[in-house]
Image (tube, grey):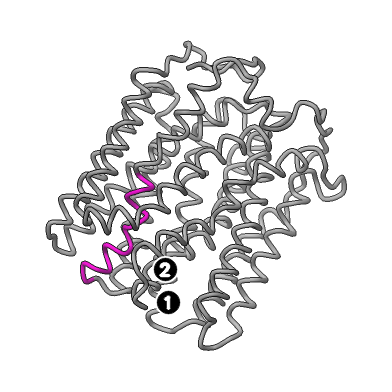
Amino acid sequence: MKTSTKIGLLSSLYLSQGLPYGFFTQALPALLRKQGMSLPDIGLTNLLALPWALKFLWSPLMDRYGSERLGRRRGYILPLQFLAAGVLLLLALPSGGVSTHWLLGVVLLVNLLAATQDVATDGLAVNILEAREMGLGNGVQVAGYRVGMILGGGLMLIVFDAAGWRPTLLSLGAMLLLATVPIALYREPPSAPPAPESLGLTWWLKRPKAGGWLLLLVIYKAGEALATGMLRTFLVDAGLSLTDLGWMLGGVGFTAGLVGALVGGALVNRLGHRRALILFGITQAGAVLLYALAARGASLALLTLVCGTEHLTSGMATAALFTVMMVESRPEYAGTDYTVQASIVVIATGSAAAISGFTAQALGYEGHFLLAAALCMVGAVYVLLAFHPPRAFAPRDTPEVSS
């Protein structure tokens, strides 16, 4: 299978996951703030992403059992993606929208579908990518996901502002169906399921020196998640319209996030895993610090520049982290191994986002972003002090994690 074909397939899959997630995490906070919801309540809506944190509980079953006819990974991805698209299209039926309680319930359901699909998608990515392709593959993974989030968040805000509820949800469902075409045409090679006793979180807990690596997963992206948990409400409170917000996220955010992910993925192997994590972690902290400066008062042009810088650096840091996570996943247990690591990241970032409304209300936006920047720097410093991989980082056929 050609590298370009792999990249195209993975791009469509991660974009598919980013579309609904982008709408519910990027657009929804702005819409709720426009309706007068408090910052703590908006922050707590991040708990609806709980399935992303808990998906490691059912990932061993997905690694163990799969469809022989449709493919061990594809057999999960295809129906789950159709179900998610169907839910979004059904949500478009009420012309005036739905109540907040119903909407939040749908958010939880779509997150469950997308998180379950993500287990199979990550497993497929680890299986089809060769070692030399992993940096590029993870760059494309982050880029595709971010493009999906920007289309689902930024672009849908513009559509909502111009046309209302029904066209927004119809557009979102249609884009998700269109992104299903590549996986529908893909024919997954047959593969044997792994032994069940080798699956699950227990294996990670017994793995030598795993504690240092798992702690890094907890702290590396938490600071950025704390910052961006209140970014949309900050921009709304700064006076931006939904259309302004949509263009900022959908134009500048799209381009900067895409470039950052691809550059980060391309550089991670050249720099080395440790150096890339340190360098990109520091730049990520600097970008979040710019939000604190912008909170003192900034023009639309300056806010746009800061937003673009943060998307760029976040894409680079995420691509580096995900590349090392993929290297640490055994190919035969890829869905479980990668999912355990990803769940730890989601638990950490989701918790940070959930409390973001409380810190923003207590400290003000400037103090909130200063705290978030400091947490980002803690992650980079931890890599510098405690993460020392050998020259060939944790080969995929050995059981040891470096710390």
For the residue pair 282 and 192, the one nearer the viewer reads as: 282
Q: Is residue 114 above or below residue 90?
A: above
- Residue at label 2? 155
Residue 69: horizontal and vertical position, in percent?
87, 49
Q: Where, by quadrant of the figure, is residue 151 drawn? A: bottom left
Residue 164: horizontal and vertical position, in percent?
45, 83
Residue 197: horizontal and vertical position, in percent?
80, 27
Highlighted range, magenta: 224-239
Q: Main secondary structure of the magenta part?
A: helix
Which residue is depicted at the point 52% across and 61% down? Answer: 19
Instruction: Assign the N terminus to one quadrant of the image.
Output: top right
User: Answer yes or no: do the residues labelled 2 and 1 have beta carbons within 8 Å?
Assistant: yes
Extreme residue toward the bottom, this view? 95
Query: In 3D space, how far apart are the residues under numbered discs 2 and 1 (Cα atoms)?
Result: 6 Å
Q: Where, by quadrant of the figure, is residue 137 drawn? A: top right
For the residue pair 30 and 396, the one nearer the viewer reads as: 30
Label 1 crowd (10 A; few <14 / some 14-19 / many >=20)? some
Element under label 2? helix
Q: Where, by quadrant of the figure, is residue 185 drawn? A: bottom right
Element under label 1? helix
In the visual, does 43 lie left or right of 209?
left
For the residue pair 300 and 136, the one nearer the viewer reads as: 300
As shown in the figure, which amino acid type bears the numbered disc 1?
A: Val
Which residue is depicted at the point 14% across and 63% down? Answer: 299
As shown in the figure, which amino acid type bears the numbered disc 2?
A: Leu
Q: Is residue 377 above or below residue 302?
A: above
- Residue at label 1? 159
